Amino acid sequence: MRMGPGLQHFILQAELLSAYRAAVRATRPLPDPQTRRETLDWLRSDIERLRGEMDDDVIRSNLQTFQRNLKTFGPSLSISGLSGIGAKLIGQKR
């Protein structure tokens, strides 16, 4: 008898969504709208691939890869605020 997704699955899905939101916010400083759109499309395709995934290990692995990619590509794209700590993003009030 197979049970539905457990609590860990929902936690991982929430972490994945949170990582995507942070990535979207981090792309705001990109000056070229076309570059930002392409970057967002690339990030979204990674997340969409995992939408229906039920294996927690696959989600966890892809979440780690997604976060690692953001840290790797962030500086090369001149994206600031990837860590979200102390960085002021455009449109964010302090």
Image (cartoon, grey):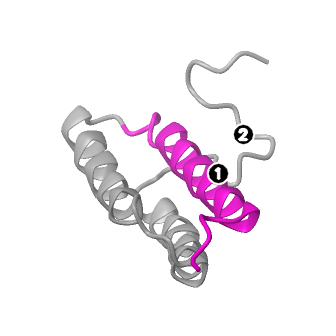
**Range of magenta residues:** 1-30
Answer yes or no: do the residues labelled 2 and 1 have beta carbons within 8 Å? no
Sequence-first tag of 2 and 1: 1
Task: Find residue 89 and report its image quarter.
Answer: top right
Q: Nearer the viewer, residue 9 or 69?
A: 9
Q: Nearer the viewer, mark 2 or mark 1?
A: 1
Residue pictured at 79% horizontal, 18% vertical: 94
Viewed as shown, does residue 82 lie left or right of 28? Answer: right
Task: Give x and y (percent) for residue 64.
Answer: 60, 76
Q: Is residue 29 left or right of residue 56?
A: left
Locate residue 22, reporting x and y percent: 59, 45
Above/below status of 13 relative to 94: below
Helix, strand or loop for disc 1:
helix
Identify the residue position indicated by label 2 in the image: 87
Quadrant housing the N terminus:
bottom right
Give the amino acid at mark 2: Ala
Residue 12 is a magenta residue: yes
Q: Quadrant of residue 2?
A: bottom right
* Residue lying at the far left of the rendered structure: 34
Q: Nearer the viewer, residue 76 or 72?
A: 72
Query: Tag on residue 38?
Result: none
The span from disc 2 to disc 1 (Cα, nearest Å) is: 23 Å
- Outermost residue on the front side: it is 1
Q: Mark number for residue 14?
A: 1
Neighbour tally class for label 2: few under 14, some 14-19, many 20 plus, Cα within 10 Å: few
Q: Quadrant of residue 4?
A: bottom right
